[in-house]
Amino acid sequence: MIDETIALTARALKKWVRNPAAIMPSIFTATFYLALFGSSFNPINLVPTQINGIQIPSTMIQLLKTAFRQSFGGAPTYITYLTAGVICLVLVFNMAFGGIDLVEDRQNGFLSTLLADPIPRASIYFSGVLQNLVKAAFLAILAFTIALFVPNGLKLPSSFGVVDLAGVFSAFILLAFALSCIFTALALSLRRIDSLVAVVNFLTLPLIFTSSALFPASSFPDWLKAIAEVNPISKASEAARLLIINGSLSASQLSTFTNDMVYLAVLAVVLAALGTLAAGRVLRAE
Amino acid sequence: MQHAISPRNGNVHGANPTACWKAGRDSQTRRNDGHHASTDSDLASDAQVVAVYRWELSPGEPETAKIIEAEHLTKIYKGNVTAVDDISFEVDEGEIFGFLGPNGAGKTTTIKMLDTLATITRGRASVAGYDVRKHPGAVRDSIGVVPQELTADEELKGVENLMLSAKLHHVRGEEAKKRGDELLKLVDLEGAAGRKVKTYSGGMRRRLQLAMGLIHTPKVLFLDEPTLGLDIQTRKNMWDYIQKLNRENKLTVFMTTHYLEEADSLCNRVAIIDHGTIKVSGSPSELKERLGGDILSIQVSEGPDLTEFFRTIPDVSAVTRVGEAYRIKLPRAERALPAILKGVTDKGLAIKEISFTKPTLDQVFLEITGKSMRDEDESARGPAWQNDTTERMN
């Protein structure tokens, strides 16, 4: 099982590496969101210095700026707040479309050949998930690096260390794993690429916009806030954001981080089980 | 040229390559119609208990003597579409067995049931001695499958496709490399192995797929329309490869084709399938002989009527005279030719023209089904579920 999964994963990654165009959309998404969207919208700059020609005292301005900053988790720049969300966004799109190769494999008969091979059928599913995880890790690193190089971009606290970095990427990988489990099973069940595109677009945009990936949930209406609180994209981006903004976490922050990670881990296990069952049904002989 | 491809299979299947194959109506009659399955079940209950026990541990040793057995095999797809309707046949080890029929006849569906890709609605089948339903894993381990679609990954190199196939068939390390080199040489792809498959021609891709299907030295090779879309030269090369594998390695080949000359040239036995049922089966020469043999046409100089003389030639079944031209029906025209020539010249007549034609499998198909298979191919595609590969796959 492991050997077959690795062999099929290696095949997929070989093709991915040989096709640099495949990662360009992710680079564009990360760069445009961080460099253009992130730079154009800085909530701190919305704090007025005067109202109706009356100068606001500087202490008041500082107070308002602090309040705004705290709404954004204490991030020194909006891009610092945004980075985790944009990485989650890149991962959501890549995991959702990650099964496109499987649909192509079905269309061109490669999947049919695999099903006649003496391999566990689950290895086809797990290789789909595993290749997406490798891609996710690479894309997360890439987007994180872009954020660091954007002018006035990601500013890490001085206490931020390797363990924090590992924590940040653990949140991303758990999210990617959970999403890949379900979207890979979905791709295996579809016979047409346009069906996958339709389903993915239907699912991903609501998933992103009901999360706190781009804006704090505190600004949401109650109904949206309730959805955002259980949205795995919110959990992953907020867990990563806690470390990115604060580095060393306080006891309450650590508790929030741990809860978010446990939530993601449980979700990943549940979706992996559901995805495995669904893939098993789909890959049965007709 | 000798190739060091050793057959993994021994002779455990009790091969008798000359007399063990029955199909179609004969077979069904012999098997006492619909009562056969339950009778077998009753008789084999002890064996099945053993088989179930073995399944929990391993598929065990092959359970039957024939390399392929199908009994009352039936496939009904959703929508109550019967693709294969109660067919029975056996294939001996070392045979090249052809399923011949037009598009949509049920050839691919039969292969898909035998190679475990499609469930069997009714009946049973065993491949390499393993029951397809009970031990699909053991069956997959024993077979090579070359589908009619060009499925090699075109973004990978030829050798990468081959090595992937090796890994998925648990052929590793040096053995995989050695076997891969041998097969690339066999299918004349040594020079192109390092190129991406997307640069290959259709013929090269088919040859690569043939090599991929053989990397683990299967006992049975399933070839689904192996020369579909190839030009005649490439097609003949493929025939050579298949014959070589069969001859040198005693590889059993189960192939489907709708090229009549392909079946005629390659197969030890064929079954003609149409609308899901086997219409007739036997060796190509047997089937053609059923038509009454060759037609010898001879035109002689003016003289006495030779009809009675021609009827005295051994095995002649019919003689027709039109003027000075005669049409003589006989099993093997070439054997009777010297006697005919001598008889005509002894009677002082000159031969103006002489020729003979051999019956073809297309004529057999015409005789059996009342239509030409070539016409069927051109005019009648099967239902979408039979032609659309994405629909067939599941």
Image (cartoon, helix red, strand yellow):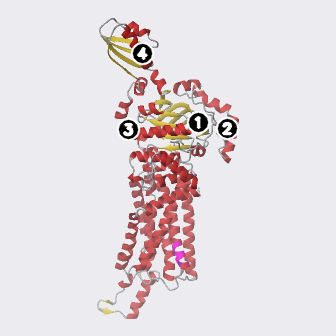
Foreground mark, 1 or 4, reads 4
- Residue pointed to by mark 2: B48
Tell which subunit mark 1 falls on.
B
Please provide percent x and percent y for residue A10. Answer: 50, 60
Query: Same subunit under labels 3 and 2?
Result: yes
Distance from label 4 to label 2 (Cα)?
Answer: 60 Å
The residue identified by callout 1 is B67
Q: Amino acid at mark 4?
A: Pro
Q: Chain of mark 2?
A: B
Which residue does the numbered mark 3 point to in the structure image?
Answer: B232
Query: What residue would you read off at disc 4?
Result: B338
Same chain for the residues at labels 1 and 2, yes or no? yes
For disc 3, the chain is B
**Above/below status of A196 relative to B326:** below
Residue type at mark 3: give it. Ile
Q: Chain of mark 4?
A: B
Mark 2 and mark 1 in contact (Cβ < 8 Å)?
A: no
Look at the picture and state if A24 lies above or below A119: below
Marks 4, 2: nearer the viewer:
4
Picture coordinates of residue B218, whole percent (x, y): 56, 43
Label 4 vs 2, first from the N-terminus: 2
- Residue B269: x and y, percent? 50, 30
Tell me which numbered mark, 3 or 1, is placed earlier along the sequence: 1
Amino acid of disc 2: Gln
Mark 2: which secondary structure?
A: helix
Horizontal and vertical percent position of residue A277? 55, 54
Q: How many marks?
A: 4
